[in-house]
Amino acid sequence: MGDATREIEALIDQVARLPGLGPRSARRVVLHLLRRRGQAMLPLAQALEAVARGARDCTICGNISTAEICPVCADPARATGEICVVADVADLWALERSGVFRGRYHVLGGTLSALDAVGPEDLRIPTLVTRVAEEAVQEVILALDATVDGQTTAHYIAEALAPTGVRVSTLARGVPVGGELDYLDDGTIGTALRARRPF
Amino acid sequence: MGDATREIEALIDQVARLPGLGPRSARRVVLHLLRRRGQAMLPLAQALEAVARGARDCTICGNISTAEICPVCADPARATGEICVVADVADLWALERSGVFRGRYHVLGGTLSALDAVGPEDLRIPTLVTRVAEEAVQEVILALDATVDGQTTAHYIAEALAPTGVRVSTLARGVPVGGELDYLDDGTIGTALRARRPF
């Protein structure tokens, strides 16, 4: 349409670029907001702006929050002796939702990838080595994806940490909770069988 | 997590309330934006705010744009003798994308609905009758959903317009373009057969 809706069209384009959305769903979202300009659209705009301006990477672990030191690192109740290494903030949030881990995190900011030309210097691996040395860490848990890139990264970190003598562990492999054997891939079944435990 | 991420959690909640999104996809969208705070999150916030503050309902037809009179009504090239009546701005946009209609619109703001207690006074029906009388309109095209509520609304409008003597038409019913007979419902096939045309 004309000039006067150019702003709306531009907004739809921006929304359509978000993950999981496309031109059709973006139009739907923007129309929904246009019908609730005061109650939903303006508050959303202001919340986005506040977070965009306030959010920062935690200077210790790389988690994103609206404080210089993230709530996990700032929490005195969290064990300092354990560091859980994750590739991404999304993984950290997933682990926090499980509520099992009570130590602290270290967000790498990705995984090593020959294809995407991501080398060790692009990730927060040097600061991890420094933290392990300085914070009297007893155990580093590698919570990385069970993919080629994830496991390459895990091996690289284990080697980089070897001189510090810290204990390095990784997430258990096996049958997922609720998993039906019939639907599991052969690799997972083989791994679970080899790692079998007394009942 | 703690206080410092409360703003981020609140933002995820707001995004999760958008149509087609849920808690999981909202988290993904917000994380995507958090990683691109300067390049994507702040511009999106500003675009949303500009549209939220600038958008208004066209005083003539009810279309939403960032001008007092929408680009369709303001376009001197659009025929004034034809008004296409739609329930919603989304329908207007859909018709504009087809590029076939060169007249003007009238957005009702919904359809009559006994279930949702939407009566004629909740829709822009009185202003439609006024426009038809004042703008020398020759034809009113009812482009309403082929649902019970849509057709109830169409009948109501046709009756309300009867005293003005204007020609009232409605969208053709039949096989959709690309439609396979095998997959069409019986109602559509019956309607298409009754409305058959010389080949």
Image: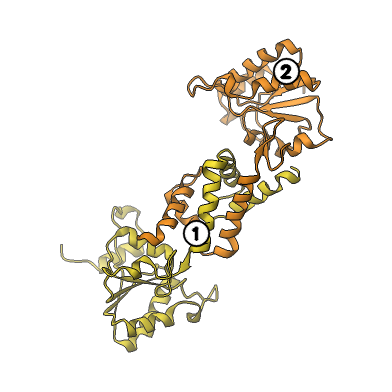
Chain colours: A orange, B yellow
Circle 2 SS class: strand
For the residues carrying marks 2 and 1, which lies nearer the camera in this image?
1
Q: Looking at the image, which is closer to me, B20 or B74?
A: B74
Q: Tell me what residue is drawn at x 46 percent, y 73 percent.
A: B111
Q: Tell me what residue is drawn at x 47 percent, y 56 percent.
A: A28
**Outermost residue, right direction?**
A77
Residue B51: which numbered mark, if any? 1
Q: Looking at the image, which is closer to me, B197 or B124?
A: B124
Residue A116 spot, x, y in % from top left:
49, 24
Residue A174 appears left or right of A18: right
Residue type at the position of mark 2: Val
Residue A110 spot, x, y in % from top left:
58, 28
Q: Looking at the image, which is closer to me, A20 or A108?
A: A108
Number of marks? 2
The answer to whether residue A69 of the structure is visible from this angle is: yes
The residue wearing badge 2 is A168
Residue neighbourhood size for the residue with mark 2, other residues' Cα within 10 Å, grouped as few (<14), some (14–19), many (≥20): some
